[in-house]
Image: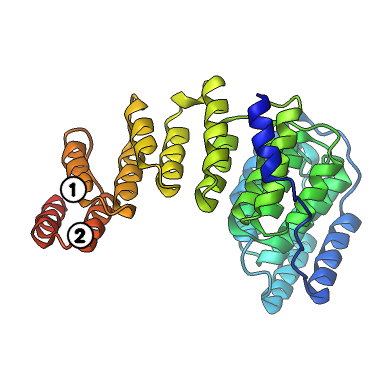
Amino acid sequence: MPAVAATIHLVVANFGTSPTLERSRKQRRANLQNALRVLDLVPSKHHHDQEEVPSHHRLINGCMGDILGVQSKLHAMRKGKESFANSSSNQAQPERSNIVSNNTSVCPSITRLTKEGMFMQIVELHRRGQISSDASILASALSYCADRKTLTAGVQFHALLVKVGYVSSIPIGSSLISFYSRCSQLEIAHRVFQNMTAKNTVTWTALISGYAQDNQVEPCLHLFALMRRSVCKLNDITFTTIFSICTNHAFLVLGKSVQALQMRMGFDSYVHVSNALISMYAKCGSIGEARAVFESITCKDLVSWNSLIFGYSQHGLAEHCLGLLKEMEGHIIPDAISFLGVLSSCRHACLVAEGRRCFRAMIEME
């Protein structure tokens, strides 16, 4: 344990806050205005019948795909709002007791509206008390925003979370961190992290992964060291994230220390963690260590084989690539990536005949 901490300390000794990218004032002003619109429309948190939550969850999830995408179409947005206004004036507002049964009919009408208009309709339904502010619903909405990197809509949902009082929730906080990280807003993600009164493994890993994906090494390793000193335990995603950092920056010493830690914690039995370790050793020049990790995997998957094939290819070991491909065919069907690694090694080693045989084998498998 001290050895691991000492190694990490050496890597992060010169830790400093990385400069954040400047965002335009216009974009910030637009995001703020969108957030304020939500804050004005949404009521404070109040109790809703529990039986309404699943159906409302389906309502919003079914419409989210249409909510997030074309918010810049202002003309369509105005038409959508007019459509909503007309439908509201022509139909009596349904009673609260009938909302659950009417969710199926409400969703198609929402999907006909424009992207911005539909979001505001959902907020309007919430204001009327016709949609509950269930945390799982809003977490799902944030997940959609993160997957599509839709910053404006995510900021609006963040405002909604603040209004209804869920922003301090650990699952919601973790979702917010992941969302802002995916949108390259790591300063905001870190601020959300710092403002959380309670954190769990997912929370720590979400921010560590965000910095790793943005290739910010020092804050990533600094957080990893802090997490080690916290009460939260590392998980498999934490290890694969740190191994990816070691792979991209050839941190062999740190990688070996983290490997020792993951073995003590029992994560060496996780195939995807071992696969990340194979790639790390291969990239750092320790192809023998990569082979040893490969041999230690009880149930190798396609990624395991491909990781070692590409490791051999990167080191110019064409004969090893060909031998591993032949061995692989007795256990699992190679894919295009497998053949790509072998063909690349044959090209660099000028093994024309072997490359042609490999190419024919690939064609025959299609």
The residue depicted at 52 percent of the width and 31 percent of the height is 259
Q: Which residue is mark 2?
A: 349
The one nearer the camera, 76 or 92, is 76
Tell me the kind of residue under disc 2. Answer: Ala
Q: Earlier in the sequence, mark 1 or mark 2?
A: 1
Q: Can residue 139 be seen?
A: no
Q: Which residue is mark 1?
A: 319
Q: Can residue 9 be seen?
A: yes
Quarter of the image for residue 67 reads bottom right
Q: Which mark is residue 301?
A: none
- Density class for disc 2 (Cα within 10 Å; few <14, some 14-19, many ≥20) is some
Mark 1 vs mark 2, CA separation in Å: 9 Å
Q: Is residue 72 above or below residue 67?
A: below
Tell me the kind of residue under disc 1. Answer: Glu
Residue 172 in the image: state x and y as whole percent.
Answer: 75, 40
Which residue lies most toward the bottom here? Answer: 75
**Colouring scheme, one of rainbow, by chain, secondary structure, one colour:** rainbow
Mark 1 residue element: helix
Residue 145 in the image: state x and y as whole percent.
Answer: 65, 55
